[in-house]
């Protein structure tokens, strides 16, 4: 029996983003699983756009008196990515999917490219706390999601929530 393969990319907890988006990411996968068995590889990003504070963002923040938040210095990003991956894999197995996970310390686009270079996937699902890229990059369609859309087209599904503030 053919099994559809999905790459699920997370930069925040699946259940947190799922709650914020009325369970859309999980419902999407459940719907696919009901049509035919699926195998999901969870790619948990340890390096997220929230970690970096671009100079322009700092300047704009200074102008309006609001500064962006960086993760706490004692926050173990790799441990968080591992915990996020394990929770997602466990949840996906509970709904009947075959699931496994990997952690990447690369940003969204390079991480996806590295994983898909050696493995074939039927669909790329990105469940992210923030799209990444500046407003200008999004306008010019140079942001990470548009870069992925050029390669994946209709095989890319994006669920975007608000970044969690720590």
Image (spheres, grey):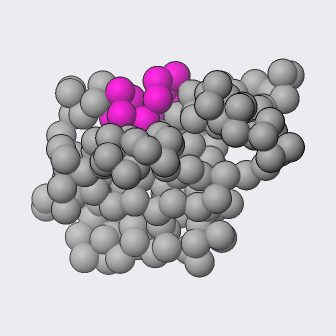
Quadrant including the N terminus? bottom left
Note whether 35 is above or below 113 in the view shown. below
Q: Position of residue 38 (x, y in %)?
A: 30, 59
Note whether 98 is above or below 159 in the view shown. above
Q: Is residue 166 visible?
A: no
Note whether 166 is above or below 127 in the view shown. above
For the point 58% across and 61% down, the residue is: 161
Q: Position of residue 102 (x, y in %)?
A: 46, 32
Query: Is residue 52 rendered magenta in the image?
Result: no
* 148 left or right of 42 in image: left
Quadrant including the C terminus? top right
Q: Position of residue 118 (x, y in %)?
A: 21, 27
Q: Along the line of sight, which residue is nearer the eye, 9 or 86?
A: 9
Query: Is residue 110 rendered magenta in the image?
Result: yes
* 79 left or right of 140 in image: right
Residues in magenta, as a range: 97-112
Note whether 30 is above or below 15 in the view shown. below
For the point 86% across and 22% down, the residue is: 74
* 66 left or right of 30 in image: right
**Image quadrant in which you'd find residue 153:** bottom left
Q: Along the line of sight, which residue is nearer the eye, 150 or 46?
A: 150
For the point 52% across and 38% down, the residue is: 44
* 37 left or right of 94 in image: left
Q: Along the line of sight, which residue is nearer the eye, 15 or 58?
A: 58
Q: How many marks?
A: 0
Q: Position of residue 127 (x, y in %)?
A: 49, 55
Q: Is residue 117 visible?
A: yes
Q: Along the line of sight, which residue is nearer the eye, 80 or 86?
A: 80
| Residue located farthest toward the left when viewing the structure as drawn | 1
């Amino acid at each position: 029996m053919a099994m559809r393969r999905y790459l699920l990319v997370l930069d925040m907890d699946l259940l947190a983003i799922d709650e914020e988006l009325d369970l859309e990411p999980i419902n999407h996968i459940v719907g696919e699983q009901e049509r035919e068995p699926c195998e999901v590889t969870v790619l948990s990003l340890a390096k997220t756009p929230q970690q970096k504070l671009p100079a322009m963002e700092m300047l704009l923040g200074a102008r309006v008196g609001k500064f962006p938040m960086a993760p706490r210095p004692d926050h173990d990003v790799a441990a968080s990515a591992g915990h996020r991956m394990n929770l997602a894999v466990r949840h996906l197995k509970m709904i009947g999917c075959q699931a496994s996970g990997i952690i990447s310390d690369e940003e969204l686009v390079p991480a996806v490219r590295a994983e898909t270079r050696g493995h074939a996937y039927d669909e790329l699902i990105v469940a992210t706390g923030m799209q990444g890229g500046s407003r200008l990059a999004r306008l010019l369609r140079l942001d990470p999601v548009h870069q992925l859309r050029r390669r994946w087209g209709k095989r890319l599904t994006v669920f975007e929530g608000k970044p969690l503030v720590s």
